[in-house]
Amino acid sequence: MKLRLPYAAAALACVFALAGCGKKEEEATKAPVSQPAATPINPATAGIVSGSVKLDGAAPKAARFKTDADAYCQKLHASAPLVSEEVVTGEDGSLANVIVYVKTGLENRTFETPKDAVVLDQNGCQYKPHVVALMANQSIDITNSDDTTHNIHPTPKNNRDWNKSQGPKAAKITDAFAREEVAIPVKCNVHSWMKSYVAVFKHPYFQVTTTNGSFQLKNLPPGDYTIEAWHEKYGVTEQKVTVGPKETKKIDFVFKAS
Amino acid sequence: MPEVQSDDPILKQSYANAILVSSFLLVLTLAWALYQEMFGLRPWRFYQTRFVAAYSKYLEGQKPKQKAAEEAIVKSPEYKSLMERIEAAQKAAESRAQEIRSELAYVDRRNSALADTFMTERARIAALVYQTEISSSESSRKSRKADVDEARNTPLVLDLPTRDGKTERKTLTFPQLEAEFTGLKDRKATLTGEQARLSNGIRDLQQQAKAYFEDRMVGLTVSQLGSLQTAAKKLDPVIRQINVGSAGLVDRCQSCHVAMDPKVVPANLVLTKADLGMAKSGDAPFSSHPNPELLKIHDPDKFGCSGCHGGNGRATNSVENAHGRYEHWLWPLYYKENVEAGCQSCHAADMVIEQATVLNRGKELYRIKGCIGCHRYEGFDNEGEQLLSARQTIRTLEQQKKDLELNVPRVIAEADHAADNTTAQSLYQKANDMRVTTSNIDARIEQLDHRNASLMREEKKIGPSLKEARMKLRKEWIPYWIEHTHEFRPTTKMPQFRLTKDEVQALAAFVWQNALTGPVPAKQSPGNAEKGKQFVETRGCLACHAMGEGANAVGGTFAANLSRVGEKDNFDYLVRWVRNPRERTRPYDPIARVDLGPEDYSKFNKPFVFDLDHDRSPDGKHLLQVQLPTVMPNLRLTIEESRDIASYLITLRHAGASYPPAEFMDDAKLKDKGRALVKNYGCASCHELSGLEEEGRIGTELTTEGSKPIERLDFALLTEEAKRGEDPDGKKSPRGSWYDQKGFFEAKLKQTNVFDKGRLTAQLKMPQPGMELPDRTALVTFLLGSVDQQLPQEYIYKPGDARHDIQEGWWVVTKYNCMGCHNVRIGQQSVLSGLPQYQGDTKDKLPPQLIGEGARVDPAWLAKFLENPSLSTTDTNRNGVRSYLAVRMPTFSFSDGEVQKIVRFFAALGSQSMPYMPPKLEPLTDAERTMARDLFTHPAAPCLKCHATGVPAHDASASAPNFLLTRERLKPAWSYRWILDPSRIAPGTAMPSGLFRKEGDVWVFNGQLPASFKGYTKDQADLLIRYLFQLTPEEQRMLVGRSPAPGGKPAGQ
């Protein structure tokens, strides 16, 4: 019974798509068997929200980490000390490691979980990348490229918590997070400076900025959305947008350096 | 002509109408009586009919869902494969089984064909042999022997069936026949054995399939539903009752609450209102028990229903009667919000009962809100009573000892002059026994003396000591506080008294003038308030105290909200208090009833020093009260830290707060009036006051208040309103008449002087406790449960085993609010764990959770730790075990008795037997020691990166305890479980899981192994544990020196 409604909706949407442009009708009806059918999105009307994230003010000087608790890490960073990735900026104050995502507006839709795993690597006694975003139930592969033991300890609020040890260059640990949460701090108890954040979403509309600070949320069905930007130090800020058919909306986020 | 009597009643009058009416009435009455007899007095008949309808409908409705669930299991590949295996096994076994069956039949046929002949022959030969043996002469023996031989060799002709169903004629001698017979017997045994083996294999598989189905089937199967339906249809409307003879309970509740009868609704089927289509109906007569777990430990066949719920179990004629909700029934059915009151009847000795959160809260409130100050309650706060009884016992024992000592010389003298040696020996023995007895008495007295000292430590007061009022408080603030208690601090445990202005002034003046004047606390220089704030937020103060007012309050409610402390406290005193809250201005001598000062000490040329190590009066005679009677522990802070904290606290005040000058505080004339008021209102019940230390409680004892007859609860002029169901404010009461215990308690707690209405004199003096509705409900629940017990003694929960230790331990654990910092039992969350600063990745900064603590630590170590949590006599400004935590395990200065109770409590909670005998661990071989060292310092096993080692530079970043504590502190079995999967013991711990993996029967290290492990087949986790339990400081220093080498190469050789 539960399955029928989305199918009906899918069929209905297909009819509209057929009437509207008369192509690609076949793709919309293909739904995965194992999970609730994804609500189809018509690429012909889908819009884009893009923009950039900046930091207003000077970025604080990155803290240096003392790595002498582990001889391996210390040796690695003997010449260039390891520094905090809490605030990373590019040119003109473009802010990296910000997660920009759709906060509201997609409640009635379901999405397919990507088959590909997201990788979180422990490399040079650091998490790479520093901020990871993925979908609920999407696999996350945790790898250890270091010649020392790490432990991976996510400390979620709404997800199941776990803490596993991973030896030097040991086999990857594959896990997944079942519930939406922005963002789960992940730490290594052995190396107290190591910290990462994993954000989990029910939908695929999210992006982690790099040092150019830009983001682009593509293939958004027309509608009203709240877009939120999250930063580990500066918290969250949100904006409301209405995306019309085939429209590209530009919005910029600015965090105040404090 | 006959005279016609015109007024003859026979002619003129008829009773026909009257008779008609009467008979009509009679018929009506009869009908009414019959109706009453059949239905009116038996309302349960309707209930049962209604139930059957609803229940049948429910069962029918369940069928499709359950059928689908059943099919899903049956169609699952695992089940299918099991079924296939059964079928294959049956098939495979079938041909052989057939063979066996026919072979068995053949063996039986053949056996029965020769059995008779064989038996007869055997008997005949046995008789001949007997004859031989009893023959007297050699010759007759010979001839008999020849007979035997002949008999054995005579051929016997037998018709025996063959396998193919025919008959063969065989000629056999007896030995041949015997061989044939035993052969057949053996064959049969072999065949039957094989037959059993064949069917056993199939039966095992069938059982597997059945278990597979049952493990996965949630709820009932369709056939089970069907048989329940059939049973429901046949249900007779009868009175269903539980009769518990030993407890005098006859409960007919199931006559209406049919679903509670396990014969009708199986115990594993939980029916809710919604299930029965009655979600919207106000009552829920047909739901099954909402908590089946409770019924498992309280079997209704033993406890009945009314044993826990109250009500009149015998009554069946109306709901009101059955529920006992009429004026003279002393145990009415508890309302839903008070239902846990029922637990109290048997669990009065338990401070904490699993699953009874409301009642637990009520008991907690009774203690922390200070009800116990005025109202005695059996089991609560009885250190004072115990002191008295201990002193009494000592006196009795001393008398006994004296008597014995007098008797010993007499017995010896008697022995000296005894007539014979035997008598003398037994008399000397007797004298010796008596002397040994006196020595035993000494030991007991010593223990009791010790207990007395303990009790003096254990005795606490609810409120602060007012002997210190002058040292501590701002003078003008005192009268303001007495008058505006709840305005100043709405969450305080001090109740609001109803006093006139004059009374307030007299009380305040008395407190002020009666307080100690010195020696005053040392003058302190101001500290760093910013740092002090951090200390307050990280040291653990918030486990008991809250900061911020109203909705902004953050922290525990066990102790005072500190938001406005700066308005009332003296800085110097506050520093002293933060440093050591138990420090008194003067020690108190309970025998002489005086507070001793330096002048008393100098009389004996002694320094004015008093603490737990110097607790005798200067004349050495009496044990002194050297601590303030507060439960607040000592956080072992430095004087600088105490100054910082006090400097912060002193800033906590409302902007512009000011208090009018109070010259009357020094008015000596007010003192006597004040003292009378203090006695009248029972202030000394909660506060220590000079000269009033021995004041008794002023209120009613409440141990059995819940079953007090209603006439003895004084509703005063509200009696009629209560009966009519009119609230004191004139509105209609939502539950109608409130003329019962519940109504009385609720009204009184809401407004303690409510029954003063219309009263002109003798106003009620109980102060207003200031509690919100949920807390009042909790207290009312507790009071309603406080009944004069009707159940027999064996029903009262008085466990003698480890559960008793749990029961006793809870009193201590809740007294000192251990649960503010620690999770003590499964399902409970500490206050600290709910604070914002301990969310997310800072969770591992929390104090350790203590679930399973008894299994973790050696009880002897725990006792030592509780006495001095710094585990050091010199370096006390730290945690002994978790030196890396900012939050501090304080020193509680527990009495020995309390330490013992806590230790036993944890042992019992962790299912550990006492006393603890540390197991002997297999010693390490030299090779094993090398291996353990290698593993320990291996880059893949970073034990020493997190665990402290005693090297200060390393320990600055440590996040786990030092391994050197292992041997004395931990239990090997726990440690083994811990390193295999720590998250199973303490979810969220910093210690990672997956360090070991199972290979065959042993656990091996989950990572690259040092070379020395080659060929080692034993359990590696066990190896590590054995190594840890023999770790010495020298060994650890050596390990630290061998810290993991970079590059993944194993360290060491």
Image: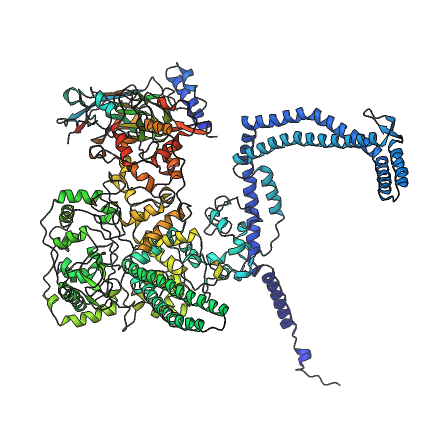
Nearer to the camera, B57 or B395: B395
Q: Residue at x 89, y 31 (%)?
A: B154
Instruction: Find residue A150 and report its image quarter.
Output: top left
Q: Is residue B606 above or below residue B97?
A: below
What is the x, y in percent for residue B952? 20, 35
Nearer to the camera, B201 or B256: B201
Instruction: Find residue B179 and report its image quarter.
Output: top right
Horizontal side of A97 relative to B851 (left or right) equals: left
Horizontal side of B274 relative to A233 (left or right) equals: right
Nearer to the camera, B540 or B386: B386
Report if residue B810 is visible in the image. yes
| Location of the N terminus of chain B (image quadrant) | bottom right
| Location of the C terminus of chain B (image quadrant) | top left
Q: Residue at x 66, y 29 (%)?
A: B198
What is the x, y in percent for residue B1050? 31, 22
Nearer to the camera, B294 or B205: B205
